[in-house]
Amino acid sequence: MLQAIGLTSTPRRDRPPAVEDLTFEALPGTVTALLGTAGAGKTTALRLMLQLEPGRGITYFRGRPLHRVAHPAREVGVLLGDVPGHPSRTLISQLRMLCAAAGVPGTRAEDMLRVVGLTGVHDQRLGTLPLGMDRRLGLASALLGDPHTLLLDEPAAGLSVRESAWLYEILRTHADEGGTVLYTTADPKDAARNADRVVTLDGGRLSADQDAADFARTRLRPRVAVRTPHAARLAAVLAQESRAARRPVEVVTEGGSRLSVYGSDCASVGESAFRNGVLIHQLAEETGDTRLSARPPAPPAPDAPASPAPAALSVPVSPQASAADSSAADSSPADGKARPAHPAPPRRPRRSPRRSPLRPLRYEIRRLLGVPSTPLVVAGVLLVSVTLAVLLGRSGRTPLPALLAGWPGISPLPPAALGAGLLGAFSFAEEYRYPALTTGRGTVPRRLGLLLAKLAVSAGVGVVLAVLVVVADLEALRFVYGGELIPVPSNWPTLCANWLGLVVGCAWAGLLGAGVFRAAAAGVAAVLAVPVVFAPPLQRLLAGVPRRTVSGLPGRLREFASVEWSSAADRWVMGALRVVGQPVGVALALTLTVLLCAYVLTGRHGRARW
């Protein structure tokens, strides 16, 4: 059961709130339609329920608010507009990434693609999907965690009659299996035909809460839709004849060539047109909104979905779930609603998955490897680094560490550090630009598990990139100039610690910079600020401070911890200490500390759980 109590949005610029004191229920086993015109507050109401919009009120999902639900993906499935995802990601990669976040097996992705009829196009990119396939993918994403409640905003907007009927079949099956379905619509006929209960909004307030049968009886009535090039003449003829016959016939002009006639039928209107020589292009009986009799219809809002074409009173036969599926036959339950048969989503036992620290880690790995930007950045870094290493080795005056890193003196950072910072910046920037964990654009759950997973994966990527660059540069130099020019230095542990610390630190700086400022450019700027802005003044400051040696620190640490380790570990510890003690290391450590504190302070609103 879904219970919305006192939902009120925060007003903006002295304007009334989009939703004010909205209270209603959506019962399990039923489909509830949230009806309202464009600007009535339907989308805002859904966002308030999901805590994506600032405001007052609370929504209970089976007795618990969303921030107290341990596994939101298992409780609520959401579809707000288009599917948020990187346009270069494939359908199967997107769903598998969401499976990792929801804690369900990866095979669930193939099951849901089969349910929504997208099995044959699982390798297609999200950016190339037409509207119908995008809605199918959105429905698959909403059903991925086998949720109890579905919240959908205008799910059939822009779809054909066939695709809309298929979508409502899926929603009906979910409700018949005990789930709760709440969707928004601006079409009264849609609500009366597909919902069990209709909640009507008017100006952000609750206008009515009715069963579908009561709604259809009080809100809708039959009418005759007429299209003729002589609409004004036919309207005058019908009005004159109705007055002469003393019949309650009402004629409403809905455009240059369209009339809606209430209180009559097709035969009477057609005979009147024939007697008066009026040409008729269309004559059909349909169901209309009673509010049209009270006032002329207003022009549609720019963002309002287009009204469906006039249709007969009978519900159309169900479409196929996909081009490969067979046609489904209509059935006629006792309630009179057409419920065509269709493949039902595979149900699993409603057993909450255990929390695991590997869930955000698996999600981040799939997010990183599911887009082509990662291999492109790695390949670009290797190509640039090898080219620079070969060019620098030609003079013979470049120090070996800079030679193996492909780091010319005029560059603030080597290609590997810049590439690691860019990949780290993409880690959070893509979450804001293409949010997949939540449905609100710009809203990213800032849980400790997600942050640790991103830090761990970006550090791993930085280490791999650093090793690949050194190996590639070394082999290129040996191939071009021979191996005798590349001796192994005696202080190689310190050099390795310096190199790995620089690359991993840049990766973390890019990640946290993008997480704070919500843009990849900000992450790259944070990386470049370390050697360009912070390191030079620190270097001048430390030049006048007397230095103290830390040569005996590993031994003192070994005695304090009562742990024995080898002399090689001592060399690595000393190398790490020298990295931190250098101006760039100090600047990088200070930058990471400031960015981490800023990230924590700006992300206290996150409530999503892993």
Image (tube, grey):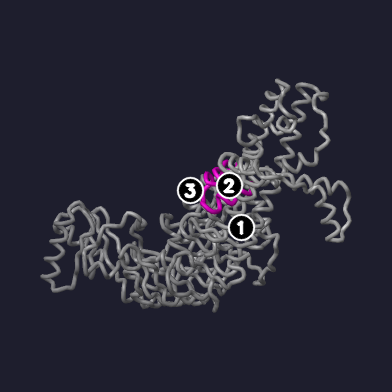
330 left or right, relative to 388: left
Q: Which residue shows up at 52% across the image and 65% down it?
A: 605
Q: In which quarter of the image is residue 481?
A: top right
Q: Does the magenta stretch include residue 520?
A: yes
The residue singled out by tag 1 in the image is: 98
23 left or right, relative to 343: left
Mark 3 crowdedness (10 Å alpha carbons): few <14, some 14-19, many ≥20: few
Q: In this view, does 467 lie above or below 182?
A: above
Q: Which residue shows up at 61% across the image and 68% down it?
A: 71
Q: Which residue shows up at 51% across the image and 51% down it?
A: 517
Residue 233 position in % (x across, y down): 14, 57
Kindly state the secondary structure of the residue where label 1 is placed. helix
Question: Which range is magenta?
Answer: 507-530
Kindly state the secondary structure of the residue where label 3 is placed. loop
Mark 2 crowdedness (10 Å alpha carbons): few <14, some 14-19, many ≥20: many
**Sooner in the amino-acid sequence: mark 1 or mark 2:** 1
Q: In this view, does 543 lie above or below 72?
A: above
**Disc 1 to disc 2, how far (Cα)?**
21 Å
The residue singled out by tag 3 in the image is: 130
**Disc 3 to disc 2, how far (Cα)?**
30 Å
The residue singled out by tag 2 in the image is: 425
Query: From this viewpoint, is residue 372 visible?
Result: no
Query: From this viewpoint, is residue 393 visible?
Result: yes
Q: Does the magenta stretch include residue 164?
A: no
| Majority SS type along the magenta span | helix
Report how many numbered discs are placed on residues in the image.
3
169 left or right, relative to 296: right
